[in-house]
Structures are given as structure tokens and as C-alpha cells.
Image (cartoon, rainbow, N blue to C red):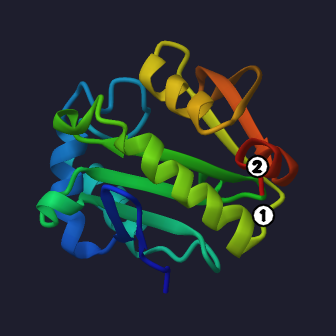
Amino acid sequence: MLPSFQTERLFLRPRTLDDFNECLAMDKDSEVTKYIPGPWSDPVQHERFLSERIQKSFGPGLGYWSIFPKEQSSQFVGWILLIPYDGIGPEIEIGWRLNRFAWGKGYATEAARRVLEHAFKTVGVGRVVADIHPENQPSIRVAEKIGLTFVGDSMHDGFPCKSYVMTRNDYSDHYGV
């Protein structure tokens, strides 16, 4: 079982099937999934994909966390992940998806900082990666704010992306630990 976390403004808990409808609704917002390939337009495949991702075990300390603001603890704002890259590995990826109403509030950055701490201090991963669509400037800003380093342009699922990396040493240098 994944641990739950608190930050200054957020509560993060392991994502469960109780979050299914909120996740599904978030994915159906074409602005939210604009830069993310997935089965968003096929309801059957979308529901199957989401159900599998929620129920899958990604390994000790890895998975998805649902994000809730402390001031409205029942309001699902999105999720953050720390899983094997593409669900397979061996690289470990970090990613986030938030409802549009939660954009621009710093929630993704705040949640990602806490999950990075978990990745490096608790799980003991050697490095974390993130591939971000080159036009997804808000996610690029989050990656840079949390200390990930741009390492080059590449392709992910047939789409162009900007690749970011953080090693354990980078984490220590960036966060002074």
C-alpha cells in the first residue's frame, strides 16, 4: 500500500477506484488531455485503461496519488504518478494531471516536490524521468521548478516530447539534502 502525504496546502492519497469517475471526467476534458496520447475518445477503451491503471501494482512505493486541497478535502483536483516509464520501466517516471479549475495554483509543483522526496529518500530510485509535449508549457514549467533538467528532444508514443531527468545527486543538490 502506498503512503499518503501532506504538503502545506494538499493531501495526497493512493488513487483508488473511488476516484474512477473523477479521473474519467478529468480525462474527458480535451484541454486537460490535449498533449497526452490516450484512448480518450473511445469510452470503452478509456474506461478499461483507467481501471487497469488504478488497480495495477507498479512495485513498492510506486503508483498514483490523488490530490485534494486541504481547504476542500473532498474536491478531487487531479493526480500525480511515480511509476515505471510507460508502466513497464526500467526507468521511473513522474507525471501529473490536474483538472482545469486547479491550473495555475502551484498544486502540481507542490505535489511533485513531495513525490520526488518520496522517490529519492524512501523508494531509493537512482533517477526520475519525465517526457513532456513541447507545446505543454505549464508542465515544462513544473518540471523545471521541481529541478528536473532538460536533456533533449525525443519521441514518446509517436509524439515529439521534451525529455527531463533528475538523479539522486541532482535531488540532493537542488533541495540541499
Displayed quadrant of residue 28: top left
Check contact, mark 2 vs mark 1: CB within 8 A: no
Depth check: 52 or 172 in front?
172
108 relative to 94 in the view: left or right? left
> Where is mark 1, residue-wise?
125
Label 2, label 1: how far apart the Cα atoms are: 11 Å
Helix, strand or loop under label 1? loop
Corner quadrant of residue 42: top left
Extreme right residue here? 169
Badge 2 crowding class, 10 Å Cα cut-off, few under 14, some 14 to 19, many 20 or more, is many
Vertical placement of 53 versus 143: above or below? Answer: below
Q: Residues within 10 Å of mark 1 (few under 14, many from 20)?
A: some
Which residue is labeled 2 in the image?
Answer: 171
Dot 2: element: helix
Front disc: 2 or 1: 2
- Residue plotted at (25% across, 42% down): 27
Amino acid type, residue under disc 1 in the picture: Val
The quadrant in which residue 72 appears is: bottom left
Q: Position of residue 117 (x, y in %)?
A: 63, 61
Is 52 located above or below residue 57 in the figure? Answer: above
Q: Is residue 118 left or right of residue 10?
A: right
